[in-house]
Amino acid sequence: MKNLIKVLLVFFIIIIIRCGEEKKEDKGGIEKRNTAPFVKSVQILPDSPILGSRVALRIDAGDKEGDKINYTVKWFLNGKEIGEGIEFYLSEAKGGDRIFAEITPHDGKLSGETVRTQQVTIGNTPPKITSAKITPDAILTSTSDLSIIGEGFDPDGDSLTWLCYWTLDYSERITDSSTTINLKNLKLKKGSHLTAELYAYDGDTVSTPYLLEIDVVNSHPILKGGIETIIYELDSIYFPLPIIDPDGDPITFEILESPEGLKIDKTKGIIYGTVEVTTTIEILVRATDVEGAYLDAKFTLTPLE
C-alpha cells in the first residue's frame, strides 16, 4: 500500500512538471508569434492646406496584440522630403505645390508596412492688406476726387489688383468699384459719411476687407471765380467780395489791412467807401464761417484811368 502511494505521488509530480514546461513553451510561442502593426487608413488635414498652414494626419491603425503604436512620419513637397512628425508647419510652399506623407507604424518590437498618403495640392494663399489711407486726407464738400491707397502683400508672390466698394451714408452703395471716385456727382454735404471697403485681389482669391470710415468735414470759405484785381473810381468804391462757403454756412467778413476810407459789410462781404490815394492799393480781408474756419484773401485795387 505504501509503495502504491509512493508511485502515485511520483506520477502526480511528473504531471505537474510537464504542465509547467508546456506553459513555458506556450508562453514562448506567443512571444514568437507577435505581429507587426498596420495602418488601415490615413488622411492629411486640412485637405486644402495653404502656405503657413499646420498640416496633420488622421491615422487609423491597429495591432493584433493590442500593443501601443508609435509612428515615423516623413513629409514630402513636390517629391522632396521636407520634414518629420505627425504635425508639420508649411513654411515653404506655394499654390499648386503637392504634398504627401509616408507613415511607418511601430509597436516596440516590429515595424509595420510603410503607407503613403494621397497627394494634396497646396491652395492659393489670399493676399493680405497691412494698411490703407485716403488722399486727400480731409474730405470737404468741394473735394473733387477721393482716392484710397492700399499697402499689402501676397504670400505666394502674386501681383495685386485693388478693388474698393463705396457706401454713402451707410446705405447707398456706389456702383464705382475703383480706388478713385469722383465726388462731384454725390452731392456731399457737411457731415456726409463714406465707407471704403478695400480688397486686394491676386488673380485667384481676394483678401479680407479693409474698412475706412470717412466723414465730410467743414469747409472753409473759398474764392469764387478767382477775382483778385478790382478797378475802382476814387470817389466811389463798391465791391462785393467773390467769397462763398461751400457748405452754405453764414460768413462773417472783416478787413485786416486797407487804406483809410474803406469799410466792409460784415454779413454781405461788400467793400465800400472812398480813398484819397491815386495809385494801386491792396486790401486784405478775412471771411470766417460759423465753425471758425476762415479764408484770408488779398485783393488789388487799381484806379480807373
Image (cartoon, rainbow, N blue to C red):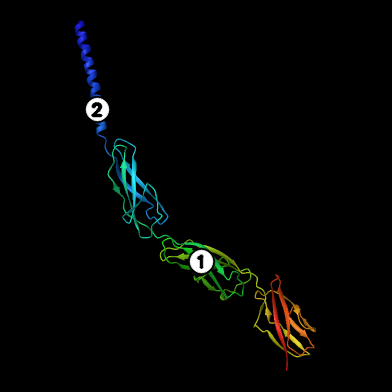
Q: Quadrant of the C terminus?
A: bottom right
Q: x and y percent of residue 212 in the render?
A: 55, 64
Where 224 falls versus 163 (above or below)? Answer: below
Distance in Å between CA atoms under marks 1 and 2: 77 Å
In-image side of 87 versus 252 (left or right): left
Badge 2: residue crowd in 10 Å (few <14, some 14–19, many ≥20): few
Where 191 falls versus 239 (above or below)? Answer: above
In-image side of 302 versus 97 (left or right): right
Q: Quadrant of the N terminus?
A: top left
Q: What element carries label 2?
A: helix
Badge 1: residue crowd in 10 Å (few <14, some 14–19, many ≥20): many
Q: Which mark is residue 23?
A: none
Q: Residue 150 carries which label?
A: 1
Please tell me which residue is depicted at 72% across the width and 77% down the height of the picture. 286
Q: Earlier in the sequence, mark 1 or mark 2?
A: 2
Q: Residue 26 carries which label?
A: 2
Q: Is mark 1 on a helix, strand or loop?
A: strand
**Mark 2: which amino acid?**
Asp
Q: In which quarter of the image is residue 32?
A: top left
